[in-house]
Image (cartoon, rainbow, N blue to C red):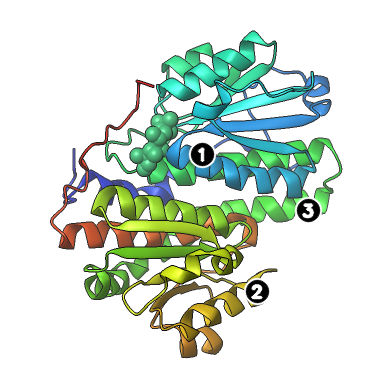
């Protein structure tokens, strides 16, 4: 039931401190500074000899995969490929023997993801599901996997499943890292950051009223750009998808630096750009991308994680999120983006939970 919320999407956005707690539960092994999972169905030796990881999925789950790629590369130093399941199923990529495939899917019923996993399994690869719905087709067919335990996600726009997917992928990268070079201290630090997440998300939700006011100012726009770099490039893609699917406003997500290779031509006073610009290794770079947009008269909505006079002077709107290490920023920065698309869709009179032309799970090709 809606439990007093106006829509399932809103309820699910607000459930995130709780759903992330459930994703973390019982999976952090502090003594060994690692994570643990019950159902991967691979021995430690087999996991240690994984040479390559393929992450596949569709839509929002594919965005999670993109974050997963950066996570595995940085924390575990394992080469990763991210594939749209719909492409992977009909391609014939050469894959090494020690390649493991993760299918990421909320529903566990997405036809393309199921078919891609089947094809990889047929080739003899170990297939694993990162899945929310218990007993779903993909959960059953995969050789092993990890459940999100996010609870039912009813709104067509994925919200809490996305942040739970990212939480699980972070723990997985920690786990694979600790099988390899990642130090005890680094593992401890990552665990401390993961443990902070539920509280940090709770705090982030406090931006709702402010985001609602911002939504009112931009609800009539016909185009939006979402820009971020590194871990927040997929955040930008996800923000754009959320806006597209429930408000029917055209939106594009890009790595902020790609702007100058074409999309910047779209920038004018009617095209807002949402910049995800928290502190981190690419902060200065994103800031200069923001300046480029401002110089061309585009309105800027900036997401920052500290009092930031430089951004405040340039941006038209500033949304503050709590600080967290960069590899977890997509989880936190997605919250205001979910709320922004929700509020804009409401103002435009759209059916937030059941957007036109869309189904919750895409069980056909
Ligand atoms: O159930 P799945 O995670 O496999 O679904 C994949 C996509 O269909 C899904 O994420 C879709 O993009 C959502 N409507 C996005 O909000």
The foreground one among 24 and 90 is 90
Residue at the image point whose x is 75% and y is 36% from the top: 176
Residue at the image point whose x is 18% and y is 58% from the top: 346
The foreground one among 361 and 151 is 361
Q: Residues within 10 Å of mark 2 (few under 14, many from 20)?
A: some
Q: Earlier in the sequence, mark 2 or mark 3?
A: 3
Q: Which mark is residue 186?
A: 3
Q: Secondary structure at mark 1?
A: helix
Q: Earlier in the sequence, mark 1 or mark 2?
A: 1
Would you say the residues marked 2 and 3 are in contact, meaning their CB atoms lie under 8 Å apart? no
For residue 252, say whether it is visible.
Answer: yes
Callout in the foreground (2, 3): 2
Q: Which residue is mark 2?
A: 285
Measured from the top left, where is residue 207 in percent x and y? 36, 69
Q: Which residue is mark 1?
A: 62
Measured from the top left, where is residue 44 in percent x and y? 79, 23
Measured from the top left, where is residue 307 in percent x and y? 52, 84
Q: Which mark is residue 131?
A: none
Q: Secondary structure at mark 3?
A: helix
Mark 1 sits near ligand 1, with its Cβ under 8 Å away? yes
Q: Quadrant of residue 1?
A: top left
The foreground one among 169 and 313 is 313
Q: Residues within 10 Å of mark 1 (few under 14, many from 20)?
A: many
Q: Secondary structure at mark 2?
A: helix
* Horizontal relation, residue 141 to residue 346: left or right: right
Alpha-carbon distance for marks 1 and 2?
A: 25 Å
Q: Is residue 79 above or below residue 302?
A: above
Alpha-carbon distance for marks 2 and 3?
A: 26 Å
Q: Residues within 10 Å of mark 3 (few under 14, many from 20)?
A: some
Q: Quadrant of residue 162?
A: top left
């Amino acid at each position: 039931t809606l439990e007093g919320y106006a829509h399932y999407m809103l309820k699910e956005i607000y459930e995130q401190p709780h759903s992330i707690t459930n994703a973390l539960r019982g999976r952090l092994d502090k003594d060994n500074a690692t994570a643990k999972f019950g159902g991967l169905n691979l021995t430690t030796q087999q996991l240690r000899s994984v040479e390559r990881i393929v992450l596949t999925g569709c839509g929002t789950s594919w965005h999670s995969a993109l974050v997963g790629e950066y996570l595995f590369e940085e924390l575990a130093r394992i080469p990763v490929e991210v594939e749209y399941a719909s492409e992977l199923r009909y391609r014939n990529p050469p894959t090494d023997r020690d390649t493991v495939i993760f299918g990421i899917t909320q529903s566990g019923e997405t036809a393309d993801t199921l078919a891609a996993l089947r094809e990889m399994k047929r080739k003899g690869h170990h297939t694993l599901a990162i899945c929310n719905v218990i007993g779903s087709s993909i959960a059953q067919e995969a050789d092993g996997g990890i459940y999100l335990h996010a609870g039912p996600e009813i709104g067509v726009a994925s919200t809490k499943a996305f942040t739970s997917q990212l939480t699980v992928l972070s723990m997985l990268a920690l786990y694979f890292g600790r099988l390899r070079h990642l130090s005890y201290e680094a593992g401890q630090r990552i665990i401390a950051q993961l443990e902070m997440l539920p509280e940090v998300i709770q705090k982030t939700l406090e931006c709702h009223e402010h985001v609602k006011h911002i939504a009112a100012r931009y609800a009539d726009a016909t185009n939006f750009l979402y820009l971020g770099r590194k871990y927040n490039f997929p955040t930008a893609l996800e923000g754009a998808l959320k806006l597209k699917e429930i408000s029917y406003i055209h939106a594009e997500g890009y790595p902020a630096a790609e702007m100058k290779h074409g999309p910047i031509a779209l920038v004018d006073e009617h095209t807002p750009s949402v910049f995800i610009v928290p502190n981190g290794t690419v902060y200065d770079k994103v800031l200069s991308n923001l300046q480029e947009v401002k110089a061309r008269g585009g309105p800027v909505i900036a997401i920052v994680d500290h009092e930031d006079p430089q951004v405040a002077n340039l941006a038209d709107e500033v949304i503050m999120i709590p600080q967290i290490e960069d590899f977890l920023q997509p989880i936190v920065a997605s919250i205001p983006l979910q709320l922004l698309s929700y509020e804009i869709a409401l103002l435009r009179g759209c059916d937030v939970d059941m957007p036109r032309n869309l189904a919750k799970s895409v069980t056909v090709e």
